[in-house]
Image (tube, rainbow, N blue to C red):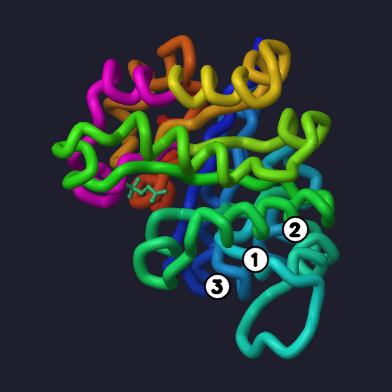
Amino acid sequence: MRKKLVVGNWKMNMTISETKDFLAQIKDKIDKKNDVAFCVPTISLESAILSLKDIDIGIGVQNIHEKDSGAYTGETAAKMVKDAGATYALVGHSERRQYFGETCEWVNLKAIQAIKHDLIPIICVGETETEREQGITSELIKKQIKIAFLNIPNEDAIKCVIAYEPVWAIGTGKTATTEQAEEVCKLIRETIEELYGLETAQKIRILYGGSVNASNAKELFSMENIDGGLVGGASLSLDFINITNA
Ligand code: PGA
């Protein structure tokens, strides 16, 4: 039985003071029978971790660099993030792919780097509206998954989390139907089975993301292959409490 996981992705929102205030308000109200985490801006990492010390809510970042250290101005290494106390790192979010040119190959290197430093990568995949209209969603998702998991051995793959986020549903209020979301999450699980076998496919957690809110979360999370959600906009408000309770 896979434990549900709900992850808030704050994107470029919340200052350090806002982080402290928000987490103080929300921390006792979140249902902790499921796993819950927030991927916060890197600058707020330490204060978020301190705000939640003694509480079973994970903290992660939204991006890491693929190298251990070096002359990469403005970047943050996985080792630094781990040392600050993070548990998760988002990898290959569609906004990173779209605005910062992250390719599938690059996403793979970042996932390997996260694993190397004992962070759980949340590997994001998803198709654009045009790709869905062209009928290439399945082909594209399989390709994104196969490249993201290159050179990742089974014992590490099993610890990764995958987030299926159709790009057309992110921040648009257009959620995928439960059937659409389940269909792609099932395909992702089948692709993992092809790569690693049935046991890993049954254990790996696959989240859905894209306009998840308190009214659609319950139905989405009840689908067989959806193990929770990656939540953007709604993770910035108290609505997130209801999503974690869903
Ligand atoms: P959204 O974002 O919930 O605001 O659609 C999801 C995400 O980008 O992770």
* The N terminus, quarter of image: top right
18 or 37, nearer to the observer: 37
Residue position for label 3? 17
Mark 1 or mark 2, earlier in chain: 1
240 sits to left or right of 130:
right
Mark 3 or mark 2, earlier in chain: 3
Looking at the image, residue 138 lies above or below residue 76: above
Q: How many marks?
A: 3
Q: Looking at the picture, how far across and down is residue 38, in whole percent?
A: 57, 50
Looking at the image, residue 215 lies above or below residue 85: above
Residue at 48 percent across and 52 percent down: it is 9
Residue position for label 2? 113
Q: Is mark 1 within 8 Å of ligand 1?
A: no
Q: Quadrant of residue 80?
A: bottom right
Say whether residue 34 is visible.
yes
Q: Looking at the picture, how far across and down is residue 14, in whole percent?
A: 46, 68
- Amino acid tagged 3: Ser
Q: Looking at the picture, how far across and down is residue 91, in whole percent?
A: 57, 54
Are discs 1 and 2 less than 8 Å apart at CB?
yes
Q: Which mark is residue 13?
A: none
Looking at the image, residue 56 lies above or below residue 201: below
Are discs 3 and 2 less than 8 Å apart at CB?
no
Residue position for label 1? 64
Give the magenta part as a residue range: 164-185
Query: Of tags 1 and 2, which is closer to the observer?
Result: 2
- Amino acid tagged 2: Gln
* The C terminus, quarter of image: top left
Q: Quadrant of residue 177?
A: top left
Q: CA distance from mark 3 to mark 2?
A: 30 Å
